[in-house]
Image (spheres, rainbow, N blue to C red):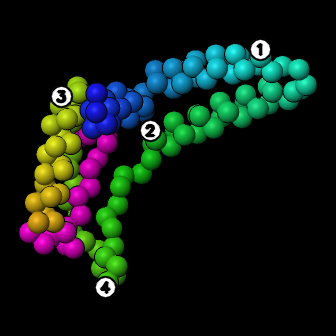
Amino acid sequence: MDFKTLKNLVDCYVVNKFHKITALLVIFFVSFFVMLFIHGNIRNDFNYEWYLYTLIFFIELLIWVYYRFRPLPKNKIKQNNGRRKIGLVIAIFSEDYEGEKIKKKFIKELDRQINEKGLGDYINLIELPNHRVKKLKNRKI
């Protein structure tokens, strides 16, 4: 398994499903048992471990909430003249690993062609996350 395949698997099964409540529960479950294992092994003089565990759970919850409800990506400003680039929003929904691979390949090829034609200074590709695209999918425009 090469790095590219591993990155696609992480994108498909971790990044695209991180916004779900089941992912939050899995994170809590795994971190709870890791902390329980650590607590069982180094429990001697550490009296404040429950405060630390609560803080860790709270930080995990904040990260999850930010990822789920983060603002949509914005268009970049050009460095040389301070004007904005043209934003090309790509909203492609993929349900499985193969779809995610095709989506990433399409975006990479589109970006390559834009830069090859010299339009990279004027066009900015903005890719929407899968969970945001799913909400747009059924909306009537």
- Please tell me the numbered disc located at residue 40: 1
Of circles 2 and 1, the one toward us is: 1
Disc 3 target residue: 98
The percent coordinates of residue 120 (x first, y second) are 19, 69
Disc 4 target residue: 81
Q: Do the residues labelled 4 and 2 touch (CB within 8 Å)?
A: no
Q: Is residue 108 left or right of residue 35?
A: left
Residue type at tag 2: Arg
What secondary structure is marked by label 2?
Answer: helix
Instruction: Give whichever of discs 4 and 1 has the lower sequence position.
Output: 1
**Marks 2 and 3, how far apart at CA:** 24 Å
* Residue count near mark 3 (Cα–Cα under 10 Å), binned few <14, some 14–19, many ≥20: few
Of circles 4 and 2, the one toward us is: 4
For the N terminus, the quadrant is: top left
Instruction: Give whichever of discs 4 and 3 has the lower sequence position.
Output: 4
**Marks 4 and 1, how far apart at CA:** 59 Å
What secondary structure is marked by label 1?
Answer: helix
* Residue count near mark 4 (Cα–Cα under 10 Å), binned few <14, some 14–19, many ≥20: few
Residue type at tag 1: Gly
Residue 14, quarter of the rendered image: top left
The percent coordinates of residue 135 (x first, y second) are 28, 36
- Count of labels shown? 4
Is residue 12 in view? no
What secondary structure is marked by label 3?
Answer: helix
Is residue 78 shown above or below 113?
below
Of circles 4 and 3, the one toward us is: 3
- Please tell me the numbered disc located at residue 68: 2
